[in-house]
Amino acid sequence: MKAKVVKWAAVKIVLLMLGAAAISCVSESPAVSKSQYGNLEVVVTTPEAKEPIFPAIFVDGKRLGNVSYRKPVLYLRRGTHQIRVESAGYEPWEDEVYILGDPNQQYLHIHLKKAEPPKAT
């Protein structure tokens, strides 16, 4: 009889733990799939390539910071985005990029051209 009571108590504990785990998985916020976002790794080079440059990067008109070796990856929502890269002494680069979403890792290699000096008139 005592073994039956202990076994029944163990079953109750397991059921309570499963119920608590199920409740903790429920979120009040809307579900967001990881596939709605994707990684875009940006690498910027120049004709000289002697010294590293850390150009400013803009996504959809908003400056996100500077591209560097330590932070080359942007985490963007799936869809089309306008990417712009600017650095002093170089022509700005701009184009549209379509982000595929997770699990895709996309790469964008940008080669900046040296800006021509203003022509004297």
Image (cartoon, rainbow, N blue to C red):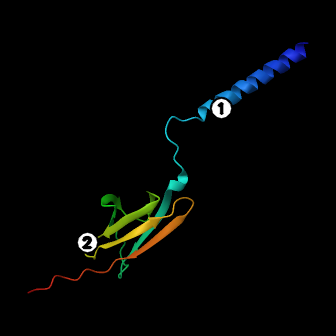
Quadrant where the N terminus is found in the figure:
top right
Classify residue 5 as left or right of residue 109. Answer: right
Which disc, if any, is residue 88?
2
Query: Where on the picture, by quarter, is residue 85?
Result: bottom left
Lateral position of residue 69 relative to residue 20, left or right? left
Q: Where is residue 113? Give x, y as percent.
A: 32, 80
Give the residue at mark 1: 21
User: Above or below — where is 74 with respect to 121?
Assistant: above
Nearer-the-camera pick, 100 or 84? 100
Q: How many labels does the image show?
A: 2
Residue in view at x 45 percent, y 71 percent: 108
Name the residue at 39% across, 72% down: 44
Mark 1 Cα shell of 10 Å, populated few (<14), some (14-19), many (≥20): few
Determine whether the residue tagged by mark 2 lies in a helix, strand or loop: loop
Q: In which quarter of the image is the C terminus?
A: bottom left
42 lies left or right of 21: left
Single out the mark in the foreground, 1 or 2. Answer: 1
Classify mark 1: helix, strand or loop: helix
Image coords of residue 28 (percent x, y): 51, 34
The disc labelled 2 sits on which kind of residue?
Ala
Disc 1 residue type (three-letter): Ala
Q: Give yes or no for contact between labels 1 and 2 (Cβ–Cβ under 8 Å).
A: no
60 or 13, which lies in front? 60
User: Which residue ends up furthest to the right in the rendered image?
Assistant: 1
